[in-house]
Image (cartoon, grey):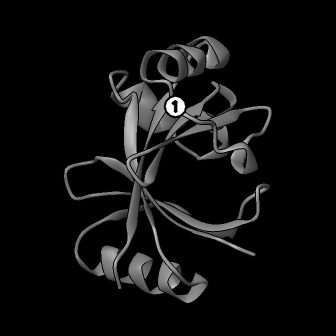
Amino acid sequence: MSPGLSVNLFCQDLDRVFDFYRQLFELEEAVEHRSPIYRALRIAGSDIGFHAPAAVALLNAGALRAQRPSVAHYPTFHVDRQTEVDALCARALQLGASLLKAPYLTYYRAWQAVLQDPEGNFFRINHYLS
């Protein structure tokens, strides 16, 4: 297994922050991931993602944001198979992670788990379905 990685930002003004990074680094949008509450830019073989405020509730991260308002970014680990999301989620829990959202089918056709590491850092494990 060789997971990919993207970093995601929680934004108050999704379009403004997305356009800032797009223009600053002259990056291409990953249009296949665009939604009303999410944008992504291709960078160095991976993505940088941008979430609108509605994503906080969707990802079940409201309590985390309330406890740690400075949490504004987090990694997403991309894997090749849906079964890897499930297996890695179980392994993360065995290693001391906390589950924020069990593996589920997202509205953008990804199989995803949302967790916190042992120090409370937010992260996702994701597989895009074909």
Front-lying residue, 75 or 43: 43
Residue positioned 44% across, 15% down in the render: 24
Front-lying residue, 12 or 66: 12
Quarter of the view holding residue 34: top right
Residue positioned 60% across, 82% down in the render: 82
Q: What residue type is labelled 1?
A: Leu
Determine which residue is flagged by label 1.
Answer: 27
Mark 1 crowd level (few <14, some 14–19, many ≥20, 10 Å Cα)? some
**Vertical order, 58 against 37 (above or below):** below
Image spot of residue 83 (x, y percent): 55, 88
**Vertical order, 44 against 91 (above or below):** above
Q: What element carries label 1?
A: loop
Image spot of residue 112 (x, y percent): 58, 66
Residue positioned 64% across, 26% down in the render: 52
Front-lying residue, 34 or 100: 34
Image spot of residue 111 (x, y percent): 64, 70
Quarter of the view holding residue 2: bottom left
**Vertical order, 67 against 126 (above or below):** above
